Amino acid sequence: MPTAETILAQKGRDVVTIVPDDSVHAAANLMNQRGIGGLVVSEDGQMIGIITERDVLRRVVAERRDPATTTVREVMTTPVVSCRAEAKLEECSAVMTAKRIRHLPVADDDGLAGIITTGDILAYQVEDQEATIQYLNSYIFNVR
């Protein structure tokens, strides 16, 4: 049964973080530079929030706040919904759907182990289905 760890083993464990007193402008620039849609907000080595493109759109742009003077702390999502590395992908997907989130930090006994997204889960499912289709075609048509 695939787990959050399954995805982290494929994609890696790199998590981009930002401190809460940085500006939203700095957060947006960092997301753009890294080609990602969210950052874990970390303070004193602890995950205290998450800021995503959606947070920037809803809490900064829509409210006409200045991203250069608005801090990440003011608009981040907290508390952070996370999962354990051993959580089944179906559970992760269900949590993400129920909470309407697209980024799910993964924690283990040592702290933050990585982050999975809805896109990661979808890509894994597509890859798994393609492998099944290939196997079935090989079996049915006796192709090796």
Image (cartoon, rainbow, N blue to C red):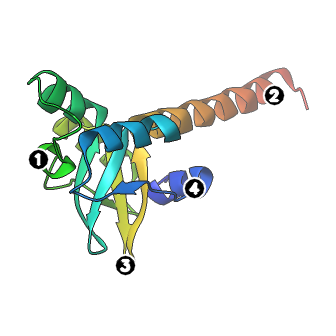
Above or below for 12 versus 31: below
Determine the secondary structure under disc 2: helix
CA gap, disc 1 and disc 2 = 55 Å
Position of 143 compared to 8: left or right? right
Dividing the image into 4 quarters, which one contains the C terminus? top right
Determine the secondary structure under disc 1: helix
Q: Residue beneath label 3, please?
A: 109
In x, y percent, where is residue 44? 26, 75
| Of callouts 3 and 2, the N-terminal one | 3
CB under 8 Å between discs 4 and 2 = no
In x, y percent, where is residue 140? 77, 23
Q: Nearer the viewer, residue 132 or 85?
A: 85
Q: Return the residue found at the far front.
A: 69
Residue 35 seen in the figure: no
Q: Residue beneath label 1, please?
A: 74
**Amino acid tagged 1:** Glu
Q: Nearer the viewer, residue 133 or 140?
A: 133
The numbered disc on residue 138 is 2
**Amino acid tagged 3:** Asp
CA gap, disc 4 and disc 2 = 31 Å
CA gap, disc 3 and disc 2 = 42 Å
Position of 8 compared to 103: left or right? right
**Which residue occupies 30% across, 38% down?**
25
Callout 4 crowding tier (Cα within 10 Å): few <14, some 14–19, many ≥20: some
| Of callouts 1 and 4, the N-terminal one | 4
| Of callouts 4 and 2, the N-terminal one | 4
**Which residue occupies 26% across, 52% down?**
22
